[in-house]
Amino acid sequence: MSEMAEITEVSGETIIGDVVERLPGGADVIEKYFGDGCFTCPGIRMESINFGATMHGVDAETIVAELKALVENS
């Protein structure tokens, strides 16, 4: 099985599971804003950062900015 490439772009429409699996440090950011329940939720494979932010009452752009900083520094 081949490894998936790292994420090179992040937006509000990026799938949470892709961030967790393909962006070094991404799981820490997701946990910071959404808690650790995301890691066992089946929705992680289909829900976007925007959707998660709405569900958790946080600002999606704050999360996206933090994730973009990880992309730029990787």
Image (spheres, helix red, strand yellow):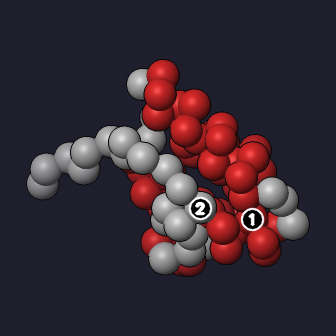
Secondary structure, mark 1, is helix
Task: Say above or below: 50 vs 63.
Answer: below
Q: Are circles 2 and 1 on residues that touch, CB within 8 Å?
A: yes
The residue singled out by tag 2 in the image is 12
Tag count: 2
Vertical relation: 57 (above or below) 5: below
Dividing the image into 4 quarters, which one contains the C terminus?
Answer: top left
Circle 2 packing at 10 Å, graded few (<14), some (14-19), many (20+), is: some
Kindly tell me whether residue 2 is visible in this rendering: yes
Q: Amino acid at mark 2?
A: Gly
Given the current orientation, which residue lies at the most extreme right position? 57
First reached walking from the N terminus: tag 2 or tag 1: 2
- Distance from Cα at disc 2 to Cα at disc 1: 9 Å
The quadrant of the image that shows the N terminus is bottom left
Identify the image quadrant of residue 5: top left
Q: Which mark is residue 53?
A: 1
Q: Relative to residue 5, is residue 67 drawn left or right?
A: right
